[in-house]
Amino acid sequence: MSLKRTAFFDRHVQAGGKMVAFAGFEMPVQYTPGIVEEHRCVRERVGVFDVSHMGEVEVAGADALAFVQNITINDASKLTPGRVQYSAMCYPDGGIVDDLLVYRMADRFMLVINAANTAKDIAWMKENLRGDVVLTDRSDATSLLAVQGPHALDTLKKLTPTDLEPLQYYHWMHITIAGVPMLVSRTGYTGERGYELYFPSDRATGDILWDALMDAGKEFGIGPIGLGARDTLRLEMGFCLYGNDIDATTNPLEAGLGWITRLGKGSFIGREAIRTMKEDGPRRKLVGFTVNDRAFPRHGYPIQIAGVDTGHVTSGTFSPTIEKGIGMGYVPADHATVGAGIEIMIRTKPVAATIVPLPFVKK
């Protein structure tokens, strides 16, 4: 099957992007400076991510709210137009279908889902469709750029007549940037102040906006950022990645997502399984850890306690910010204590690590 390309493909190549297959798209994993430099660009200056491969699904109709309430674990009834909510969809057994963002419009919702899960998620939504609900897949028709970093606001200020300063975290608004009408939100996957720009997908519009952003951010040291740095940035913040830290085998309570799980809102898919786990207590928990020497962990490396395998690293990397190996993984609940020691099997050698509070980088 041929890979899709976003509206920014040519700009990625021109910027020296190393293109790889990801979620059915050709996407830049890194650019010429490398992942560490891109990571620091976002932490210290401002970076632009092409995340147009993400999925966007509109939910409309008289029963749209009831539908969203049934398929997600957070309480969408608390949303008012202009607000965004982090949530997840679960299977009846409590396993996670996907984590997602729920945008509340005046007369509909927009669900933003993970790129690798788009087809699966939409099939799940259709399988659970009830009442007067219309689902519209806007994924291919929507481009999405994320502008992240301490100078993200400074960059966008130069391109819009709208005052973005009042836009609060997990809120959105309709504005124009570089003359392009769009939806702009403040959520982010890096821990830095940032903005997500949703607009119609076509190459000409993409070129205009990309070039305008790069020109406006030049004085702040702006740069394009690939998938590699996106992963190291989100891991420093302890943000879960579907397929690594959460999947169909993990319950939200095990993954530390109890804060988005609203058991009191009424019936929803997975509620009984999650409620049972809350009553019994999870047998394992997702924890963050730092490695005690210069080695760094990778996804899949075994986690041991007293020489016995207890799980594996779900996400691991070298943190450019704190300059040590960091990771996340599941350990028995009775050992999931800050300060507790574990071992990570790195190239057949057990390396000491310490469970630490998340996030790894305090913002």
Image (cartoon, grey):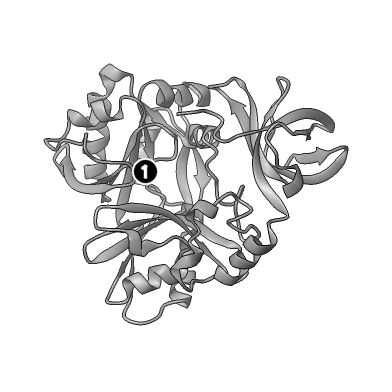
Name the residue at 29% across, 59% down.
Answer: 104
How many labels were placed on the picture?
Answer: 1
294 left or right of 141? right
Q: Quadrant of residue 161?
A: top left
Residue farthest toward the right in the current orientation of the protein: 307
- Report which residue position mark 1 lands on: 187
Q: Quadrant of residue 250?
A: bottom right
Q: Is residue 177 visible?
A: yes
Q: Quadrant of residue 158?
A: top left
Residue farthest toward the left in the current orientation of the protein: 161
| Residue 333 placement (x, y as % from top left) | 72, 48
**Who is closer to the viewer here, 219 or 333?**
333
Residue farthest toward the bottom in the current orientation of the protein: 131
Name the residue at 24% across, 26% down.
Answer: 154
Name the residue at 16% across, 43% down.
Answer: 176
Regarding mark 1 in the picture, which secondary structure is present there? loop
**Image quadrant occupied by the C terminus:** top left
| Residue 169 placement (x, y as % from top left) | 33, 42
Crowding at dot 1, Cα within 10 Å, few <14 / some 14-19 / many 20+, comes out as many
Q: Is residue 2 visible?
A: no
115 left or right of 353? left
**Who is closer to the viewer here, 249 or 176?**
249
**Who is closer to the viewer here, 226 or 131?**
131
| Residue 67 placement (x, y as % from top left) | 39, 73
User: Which amino acid type is marked by label 1?
Assistant: Thr
In the image, residue 231 sits, relative to residue 42, either above or below, namely below
Name the residue at 52% across, 23% down.
Answer: 36
| Residue 357 placement (x, y as % from top left) | 60, 34
